Amino acid sequence: QQQVKQSPQSLIVQKGGISIINCAYENTAFDYFPWYQQFPGKGPALLIAIRPDVSEKKEGRFTISFNKSAKQFSLHIMDSQPGDSATYFCAASGNTGKLIFGQGTTLQVKP
Amino acid sequence: DGGITQSPKYLFRKEGQNVTLSCEQNLNHDAMYWYRQDPGQGLRLIYYSQIVNDFQKGDIAEGYSVSREKKESFPLTVTSAQKNPTAFYLCATQGGGGGIEQFFGPGTRLTVL
C-alpha cells in the first residue's frame, strides 16, 4: 500500500512537444504529491506539488493533473525544451511527512 | 540545495572500512532525511530525524547509523556491515513554519574499491 508506481521509465520527446509522466498510488491516506527534477550528479529539486483538494495545478510550462478517484496523478511539460532533459520523480506522503518515491522517468528532449 | 551542504562530494572507501557522510543545514528545519539512490532506481529512505536527539529507521537502515546531536547536523555512517554501499547518497530537510516540502542537498557519491 506504500508504493508509488511511475511510468514510463524513459521518454523521448521532440522540442516543443508535450511530455507526460504518470504516477499511481495505493494509499488513500496520502495527501501531498510533489514532483522532483534531477539533473545528473545533482540532488533532486522540487518542481511542483499538489494537494488532493484540487484537480490541477499549473506553474509555467509544468502542470500536475490529479485524479483522486483513480488514485493517479501526472506531470505535463508543455513546449518541452532540451534543458528539460532530466530525471523526474513523483512522490507521495501522508501525515508522517515521509515521502514515497516513484522509480523515476528519464526524459530526453531532442532539438 | 541552497542551505544544505553535503560533504565530501566524492568518497572512496576500501572494503571493511566505516565512512561518515556529512549533512549540514542552515534552514532551521526540524526534520532531516537520508536517502540512497542507485542507478535507474528511485530514492530509498535510510534514516530520518524529526527532532534533535531522536531518529528512526527507514526502509533500508541495515548497515547504516546516524546521530542528531544538533539541529543543523545529521551525519550518516556507512558501516562495514553494509554489503553493497556504492551509491549516491542524498540528504534532505523538511519543516520551517509547518512546511511539508523536502529540500535536497547536492549529494555524496560513495564508491567502494
Image (cartoon, rainbow, N blue to C red):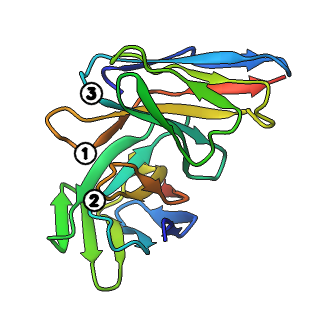
Q: Name the residue nearer the viewer: A59 or B7.
A: B7
* Left or right of residue A105, residue A24 in this image: left
Q: Give the vertical position of B20 relative to B50 (above or below).
A: above
Residue B100: which disc?
A: 1
Q: Which class describes the residues within 10 Å of circle 1: few (<14), some (14-19), or many (20+)? A: some
Which SS class for mark 3?
loop
Residue A83 in view in this figure = yes
CB contact under 8 Å: marks 2 and 3:
no
CB contact under 8 Å: marks 1 and 3:
no
Q: Name the residue nearer the viewer: B93 or A72.
A: B93
Which SS class for mark 1?
loop
Question: Do tags 2 and 1 sit on the same chain?
Answer: no
CB contact under 8 Å: marks 2 and 1:
yes
Q: Quadrant of residue A76?
A: bottom left
* Residue marked by disc 3: B29
CA separation in Å, label 2 and label 1: 8 Å
Say which residue appears at 60% left-offset and 42% top-offset.
B37
Kind of residue at disc 3: His
Kind of residue at disc 1: Ile
* Residue marked by disc 2: A32
Question: Do tags 1 and 3 sit on the same chain?
Answer: yes
Chain of the residue where label 1 is placed in the rendered structure:
B
Quadrant housing the C terminus of chain B: top right
Quadrant housing the N terminus of chain B: top left
CA separation in Å, label 2 and label 3: 19 Å
Question: Do tags 2 and 3 sit on the same chain?
Answer: no
* Left or right of residue A12, residue B83 in this image: right
Chain of the residue where label 2 is placed in the rendered structure:
A
Say which residue appears at 54% left-offset and 44% top-offset.
B58
